[in-house]
Image (cartoon, rainbow, N blue to C red):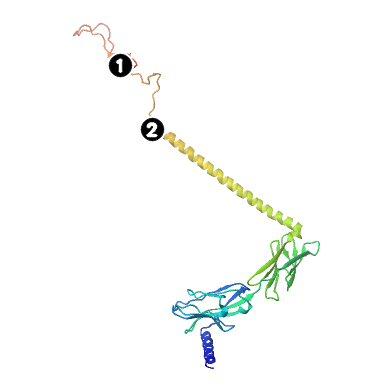
């Protein structure tokens, strides 16, 4: 009887503790059946290192982990091998989850009104494959589409011309009986049928040109022209750039050669042109020859006019 009262008091304390801390902030987590999930504890700045931390599974009212600092974590025998607890960051790793593991998991500090974190785990099976069927309803490009799974299906109709596809139904989606989403939609020239939930997805697709080849030809022509123009423009730009670079380098080279030639011309003396094989220029010697004055010391002048001066040019012999 005393033990039952103690357990009841503990349960009331935990309920009061969670209510005060506003534990309604629950993080939803979707896990595929048979997979593992890691639950992280959000540690506050004022968290004390010597605090006692527990992880609680509210659905079964079970304490999964009780951790006292400097001691080994305490895990119930039922969960041995299915739980991994980190003493560094207080995270909880749950393995091989099944439907019975769905519910709310809470990390909290014992003795304080502090809830570290709370998760609501949902277990889901992988979605089933889908089958997309497309048929042409007339000579024009009117397509009837059916997207089917094991337990659900949706129908749609697309009317396509040379540019777009539209019409009755169009893009459609609905939730199947298993809770998964079933959707049919169009992207460019592809029709998609998608079956998905929060943990998995499958799809099937079909091309419109398979049923409307004329529309595909028109689209190819519409696409080819701008692509061709863009390609030619790009090539012209590349060629023009290459020609510009080559011409610029040529101009630089010619300018450098011209400057070198000018420097050489101004630094060398002008050589004299001569026929002398020795390379030496001939020199001339001039002397002044006066008129004959007769005897030495005579002052008489002759009876004819004397020339003022006579010049004779004597060639200097060339050096051997």
Q: Which residue is mark 2?
A: 267
Q: Report, in whole angstroms, how far the alpha carbon at label 1 lies from the one at label 2.
A: 34 Å
Q: List x then y, in percent, for residue 91.
A: 52, 75
- Does the rendering let one see residue 230? yes
Foreground of the two, 94 or 140: 94
Identify the residue at the far left of this view: 297
Residue 186: quarter of image: bottom right
Q: List x then y, in percent, for residue 170.
A: 72, 68
Which residue: 59% across, 72% down?
36
Foreground of the two, 104 or 318: 104
Which residue: 46% across, 36% down?
257
Mark 1 crowdedness (10 Å alpha carbons): few <14, some 14-19, many ≥20: few
Q: Which residue is mark 1?
A: 286
Which residue: 63% across, 78% down?
99
Label located before the other in sequence (1 or 2):
2
- Element class at badge 1: strand
Which tag is nearer the camera, tag 1 or tag 2? 2
């Amino acid at each position: 009887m005393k033990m039952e009262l103690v357990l009841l008091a503990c349960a009331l304390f935990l309920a009061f503790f969670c209510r005060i801390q506003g534990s309604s902030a629950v993080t939803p987590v979707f896990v595929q059946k048979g997979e593992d999930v890691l639950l992280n504890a959000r540690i506050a700045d004022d968290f004390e290192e010597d605090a006692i931390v527990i992880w609680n599974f509210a659905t079964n009212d079970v304490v999964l982990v009780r951790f006292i600092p400097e001691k080994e974590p305490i895990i119930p025998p039922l969960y041995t091998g299915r739980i991994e607890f980190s003493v560094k960051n207080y995270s909880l790793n749950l393995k091989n989850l099944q439907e019975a593991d769905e519910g709310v998991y809470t990390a909290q500090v014992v003795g304080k009104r502090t809830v570290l974190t709370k998760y609501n785990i949902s277990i889901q099976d992988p979605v089933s494959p889908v089958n997309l069927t497309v048929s042409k309803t007339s000579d024009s490009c009117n397509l009837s589409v059916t997207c089917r799974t094991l337990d659900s299906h949706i129908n749609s109709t697309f009317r396509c011309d040379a540019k777009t596809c539209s019409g009755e139904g169009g893009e459609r989606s609905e939730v199947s009986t298993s809770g998964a989403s079933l959707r049919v939609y169009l992207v460019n020239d592809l029709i998609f049928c998608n079956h998905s939930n929060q943990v998995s997805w499958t799809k099937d697709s079909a091309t419109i040109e398979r049923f409307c080849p004329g529309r595909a030809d028109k689209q190819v022509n519409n696409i080819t022209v701008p692509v061709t123009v863009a390609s030619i423009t790009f090539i012209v730009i590349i060629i023009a750039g290459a020609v510009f670079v080559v011409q610029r380098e040529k101009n630089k080279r010619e300018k450098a050669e011209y400057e070198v030639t000018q420097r050489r011309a101004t630094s060398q003396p002008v050589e004299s042109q001569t026929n002398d094989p020795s390379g030496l220029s001939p020199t001339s010697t001039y002397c002044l020859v006066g008129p004959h004055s007769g005897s030495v010391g005579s002052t008489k002048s002759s009876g004819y006019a004397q020339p003022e001066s006579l010049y004779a040019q004597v060639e200097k012999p060339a050096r051997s």
